Amino acid sequence: MTCLRNNFLITGLLVVAACFYSRGQTKPEAAPAMPTRPLEVSEIDGGSASTSEYGTVLNKDTSLHRKCYILNDHSSPLQLSGAGVTVAGANTFVLKGDATTSAEISAIDVVAVLFDLWGDRSMNLRMLKVKDLSSNTTFSLSDSDTKWPADENTVKEYLTSVTYVRRVRLADGKVWLSDMAAVLRQITDLHLKVSK
C-alpha cells in the first residue's frame, strides 16, 4: 500500500510539474528570413564542350557550348568580369577573366563551382591569392595559381561554371564575406543543383 501511495504521489508531482512547466509557453515562432544582398548575374559563352588534346577528342559530335555565370555583389571590394572556367586539353581546368579592386586588398578568395551536363555540382575550384593590391586595379585571374588538374570524365561532363568572390581581406584587416544565401539562391534560380 505504501508503495502504491508513493507511485501516486510521484505521478501527481510529475503531472503538476509538467503543467507548471508548460503554462504560458507557446510554440516558438519561425525566425523571419534574413534579406539577402542582390547579386548581378552575367553570362558568357565558355566555348565548345568538345575538347581535344594529343589526338584524344572528348565530346567530338556535340553542339553543346559551356556556360559561365559570374555573380557580383556590389558591396564587394572585388568585382569579376569575363570570369569562368575553361578546359586546357583533356586534363586541366583554367580560370579565366579579370578582377577589379575598389579598395586596398591583402588577400582574395574566388570560387568557381562546376556543374555537369545534368546540372549537378561536380566540384569547386578555389583561387586564394595572398597579394597586396591597390585600389582601382584590374588584373587577370589567369596565372599558374588558377590551373587545376582534372580527370577525363570530369572534363567530358563539365558544362557550366558559376564564379563568385567568397572573401576579401582588406589592407586594414577587415574581412568582407559573400552572402552565401544569395549565392545559393542564385545557383538554384539558374536551375543548377548544389548537392547530388
Image (cartoon, grey):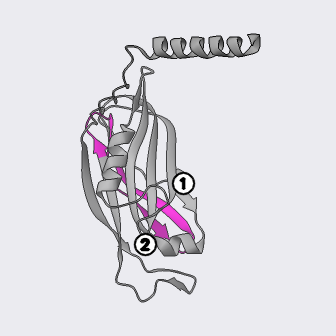
For residue 117, which numbered disc appears in the image? 2
Circle 2 SS class: loop
Query: What is the chief secondary structure element of the magenta stretch?
Result: strand
Magenta residue check for 98: yes
Q: Position of residue 127 (x, y in %)?
A: 50, 47
Residue 138 in view here: no
Residue drawn at 37 percent across, 28 percent down: 104
- Residue 29 or 162: which is nearer the viewer? 29
Q: Position of residue 177 (x, y in %)?
A: 40, 33
Q: Which residue is mark 1?
A: 144
For residue 130, which numbered disc appears in the image? none
Please state which amino acid type lies under the numbered disc 1: Ser
Instruction: Report which quarter residue 183 is drawn in.
Output: top left
Residue drawn at 39 percent across, 40 percent down: 180
Residue drawn at 42 percent across, 71 percent down: 118
- Residue 92 or 139: which is nearer the viewer? 92
Residue drawn at 44 percent across, 55 percent down: 194
Circle 1 SS class: helix
Please state which amino acid type lies under the numbered disc 2: Leu
Q: Position of residue 10 (x, y in %)?
A: 65, 13
**Magenta-highlighted residues:** 72-99
Categorize mark 2 by other alpha carbons within 10 Å: few (<14), some (14-19), many (20+). some
Nearest to N terminus: mark 1 or mark 2: 2
Magenta residue check for 65: no
Quadrant including the N terminus:
top right
Q: Position of residue 7 (x, y in %)?
A: 68, 16
Categorize mark 1 by other alpha carbons within 10 Å: few (<14), some (14-19), many (20+). few
> Image check: 61 left or right of 151?
left
Viewer-side label of 1, 2: 2
- How far apart marks 1 and 2 lie (CA) works out to 27 Å
